[in-house]
Image (tube, rainbow, N blue to C red):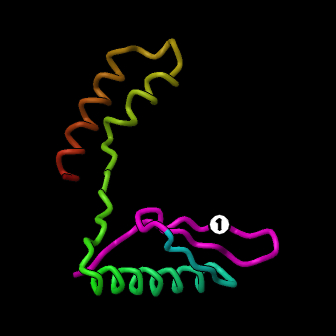
Amino acid sequence: MQHTYKIMLQKEPEGGYTVVVPALPGCITYGENEDEAITNSEDAIDIYIEELQSRGEPIPVEEKKQKKIEDFIDVLIAESRKDEPKRCWDDVKRSLHEMNKFNN
């Protein structure tokens, strides 16, 4: 089974990158550059999951939270110029809502 997890890449002051996998507590690795750090994180995730499986423990599943276009439209409206007609934004919101149906 393929597992996908978000990683957090942090550039270190002394050089290189630390990688943390938030959904897998204690799953941390390092790389001299971004590519190496990402490759190492893939290996670390595989090893972490193999260890959980060997212990018979459940594999954490990271929830995919997909933002919808509507999540952003209110920000757009709030930041719009006050002289923009409300009707225009209602049309935009309606159009984006229709577009979002195709993305699901």
Quadrant in the rendering for residue 2: bottom left
Q: Tell me what residue is drawn at x 80 percent, y 68 percent.
A: 13
**In the current view of this chain or complex, which residue is farthest to the right?**
14
- Per the rendered image, the range of residues in magenta is 1-25
Q: Is residue 11 left or right of residue 1?
A: right
Label 1's element? strand
Q: Residue 85: percent from the left, percent from the top? A: 40, 14
Residue at 37%, 14% in the rendered image: 86
Q: Is residue 36 left or right of residue 23?
A: right
The residue carrying pointer 1 sits among few (fewer than 14), some (14 to 19) or many (20 or more) residues within 10 Å by Cα, namely some
Residue 33 falls in which quadrant of the image?
bottom right
Q: Which residue is mark 1?
A: 10
Q: Residue at x 30, y 57 (%)?
A: 64
Does residue 20 lie above or below 72 as drawn?
below
**Hey, what amino acid is under mark 1?**
Gln
How many labels, in total?
A: 1
Magenta stretch contains residue 11: yes
Which secondary structure class fits the magenta region best?
loop
Instruction: Give how far across and how far down residue 43 sits, in percent.
Output: 46, 87
Image quadrant containing the N terminus: bottom left
Work out whether 82 lies above or below 72: above
State the residue lying farthest toward the front: 55
Q: Quadrant of residue 9?
A: bottom right
Q: Nearer the viewer, residue 97 or 4?
A: 4
Residue 82: x %, y % from top left: 51, 13
Q: Name the residue located 27 percent from the left edge and 74 percent from the top edge.
A: 57
Across and down, in percent, residue 55 comes to: 29, 82
Taking the magenta stretch, the answer to whether it contains residue 74 is: no
